[in-house]
Image (spheres, helix red, strand yellow):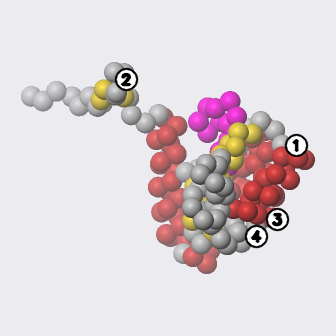
Amino acid sequence: MKDAKKPVKNATATGRAYEGFSDEERAAMKEHAEELKAATRRGPRAAKADGERDVLAKIAEMPETDRVMAERLHAIIRATAPVLSPKLWYGMPAYAKDGKVVCFFQSAQKFKSRYATLGFNDTANLDEGTMWPTAFALTRLTPADEARIAGLVERAVSCAHPAR
């Protein structure tokens, strides 16, 4: 008779056991799989309108602090870069150009963090020298922060990558 299957625990370089993905990470991956299935069912024409609706619904579910920031970010991104299409990405509001996510908002609640995050993927044209930030911690948004975010988003969707 075989023993019941036990979770795999691999030792890491530090000698601590690797427990696998966290519950939050598994939930995000499950959400992403559901998003991909829904996008396939909808087809390309409905994706844009449904993406906007899905993002606004996800934002509405957030705790107040994150919701206020996410609503403001959504408005800034939509006004600054109308070429970006809202969509859900791993259960987070995201904004894509030609189907590729350029930037996203991760609520503090998503991974039980002390701050929310505005992140940019490698498709964002933010290259600056040999090192540049790709994510920003957010605790609240000031008018100066909003102006900086608008500038980053505008630059992120610009046509040319600087020389690497």
Give the residue displayed 83% in from the left and 43% down from the top.
141
Quick check: marks 3 and 4 in contact, CB under 8 Å?
A: yes
Spatial separation of the CA atoms under disc 2 and disc 1:
41 Å
Give how far across and how far down residue 80 sits, in percent: 80, 64
Q: What is the three-letter code of the residue carrying label 2?
A: Thr
Query: Which circle's residue, 2 or 4, is located before the other in the chain?
Result: 2
Name the mark nearer the viewer: 2 or 4: 2
Asked if residue 92 shows in the view, the reply is no
Query: Which circle's residue, 2 or 1, is located before the other in the chain?
Result: 2
Spatial separation of the CA atoms under disc 3 and disc 4:
6 Å
Predominant SS along the magenta part? loop
* Residues drawn in magenta: 105-116
Residue closer to the observer: 97 or 28: 97
Query: Which circle's residue, 3 or 2, is located before the other in the chain?
Result: 2
Which of the labelled discs sits on residue 142, or is there none?
1
Q: Which residue is mark 3?
A: 79
Asked if residue 161 shows in the view, the reply is yes
Spatial separation of the CA atoms under disc 2 and disc 4:
46 Å
Query: Which circle's residue, 1 or 3, is located before the other in the chain?
Result: 3
Say whether residue 39 is left or right of residue 48: left
Query: Which circle's residue, 4 or 1, is located before the other in the chain?
Result: 4
Spatial separation of the CA atoms under disc 3 and disc 2:
47 Å
Q: Is residue 122 above or below residue 82?
A: above
Q: Secondary structure at mark 2?
A: loop
